[in-house]
Amino acid sequence: MPPPAAAKKPSLRRAAKLAAKPPAKPRPTSFERTAPKFESAALATPEGRKKAVLALRAVRRGVVDDARWLDRCLGLLTALPPEGGAVEIRELRADVLSTVIHLQDPRAANQLLSLLDDGAVDSPRAMIVFVIGKLGDRAAVPPLLSWFNRQNGRNSERVYREIADTLIRLADARVFKLVERALKREATNDYQRWAYEQALESIMKGRAPSHSLWLR
């Protein structure tokens, strides 16, 4: 069996050419590739908003490769109409909030809390509170309780129930009196009353409740 042929050494000219070749540019991140889909002009049309929804869903299916996604999502929340609007606007808002949950960025809870006093009306406000609970950051409990106590009835029943549900989901003992008060005042059917009681029992045992306070 003949010996294997020796590999050819590159010529000096070829070696110099390879050395002079500029390094490859880094591949753009998903954030950079999708930037045009989130520009104001693109989001001004129903078709553009649908494309933005698809881009957000692709982010949730893959690996987040850019920390700037959180800032983009929060910017979208403040730019979208606060209430109602076309179906694709409501869909885009829901997908933005789902993406915030997916990102699990430790900055998210504080930045969402700052949006609660930013003129949002009931529907987005309840959704924001829900996302704060899903993020699971117990550091959000004191500012959320403070915000709750400043409201003086300025929000709908849906918002108050979402706040109580979120505080219970975070399983912090400081919400015991709040939930006890809600149990006496707001439980309007057997399921809600049972769920409140189960939540209180779980908090007393230091566990996160597994039951929602109200039927969605």
Image (cartoon, rainbow, N blue to C red):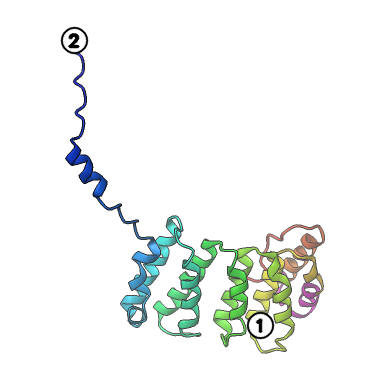
Q: CA distance from mark 1 to mark 2?
A: 87 Å
Report the front residue among 89 and 24: 24
Task: Report the amino acid beneath label 2.
Answer: Met
Label 1 secondary element: helix
Specify whether 43 is left or right of 160.
left
Q: Nearer the viewer, mark 1 or mark 2?
A: 2
Is 187 contained in the magenta span? yes
Q: Which residues are magenta?
A: 178-190
Magenta part mainly helix, strand or loop?
helix
Query: Which residue is labeled 1 in the image?
Result: 157
Q: Is residue 128 left or right of residue 23?
A: right
Residue 134 x/y as whole percent: 61, 65
Q: Quadrant of residue 177?
A: bottom right
**Who is closer to the viewer here, 57 or 200?**
57
- From the viewer's side, name the closer residue of 211 and 28: 28
User: Which of the 4 image quarters holds residue 57?
Assistant: bottom left
Identity of the amino acid at label 1? Glu
Task: Check disc 2 and report the residue beneath it.
Answer: 1
Counting from the top left corner in percent of width and height, residue 33 is at: 34, 65
Q: Secondary structure at mark 2?
A: loop
- Which numbered disc flags the more N-terminal residue, 1 or 2? 2
Packing grade of label 1 (10 A; few <14, some 14-19, many >=20) is few
Query: Could you tell me which quadrant the N terminus lies in?
Result: top left
Residue at the spot 58% in from the left edge and 80% down from the top edge? 115
Instruction: Assess disc 2: are there few (<14), some (14-19) or many (≥20) residues with their C-alpha within 10 Å of its C-alpha.
Output: few
